[in-house]
Amino acid sequence: MTFRSSPDESLIGRATFFVHHGLIMIEDPESAFHHDDWDPAVEDVSAGPDSVYLSVQPAVDGPVEIGIFRSEAGLVDGVAYFDGDLVTSSGMFVIHDANDVMRFTVGAPRGRVRVKVHVDQLGLASRMSVAFVLE
């Protein structure tokens, strides 16, 4: 995994790594929503009240670059993959892959937070940007 700095003041973090199960999760660490009925072969995204699961390209197809931002300013050009409110009761969100090779924790106000995700390609994304719209 590589980390890069950026002159963008809204950048929280950026990583490039191999996602072995092709799954990125954004969730409140206290989330009880399990996405049990989600079939990633049918749908690329599964959203619950306090979490969203997102399909990306698996490790066999190459690494995935993820940028995490405090505002929409950092969103990459591309396809809107998710745009909705997630609830946090803990005051934070965790962005991670199924094996926790990459894990970011982002502080947020308790309650509803607008989250926007853009990708370069639906389903098999190799670039993803996540914005927590806190303004």
Image (cartoon, rainbow, N blue to C red):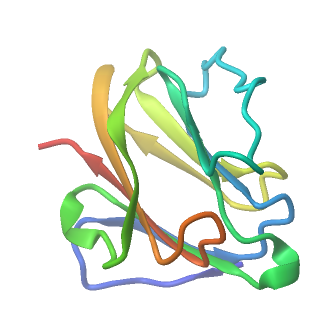
The residue sitting at 65% across, 18% down in the picture is 33
In this view, 66 is above or below 81? below
Quarter of the rendering containing residue 83: top left
Q: Nearer the viewer, residue 56 or 32?
A: 56
User: Is residue 109 visible in this depiction of the protein?
Assistant: no
Q: Residue furthest left?
A: 135
The residue sitting at 60% across, 27% down in the picture is 29
User: Is residue 113 visible in this depiction of the protein?
Assistant: yes
Instruction: Residue 90 in the image: state x and y as whole percent.
Output: 47, 19
Instruction: Residue 22 in the image: state x and y as whole percent.
Output: 77, 61
Instruction: Residue 31 in the image: state x and y as whole percent.
Output: 61, 20
Quarter of the rendering containing residue 1: bottom right
The residue sitting at 56% across, 41% down in the picture is 94
Q: Nearer the viewer, residue 18 or 55?
A: 55
The residue sitting at 70% across, 26% down in the picture is 35
Q: Is residue 101 left or right of residue 25?
A: right
Instruction: Residue 132 in the image: state x and y as whole percent.
Output: 31, 48
Quadrant for the C terminus, please. Answer: top left
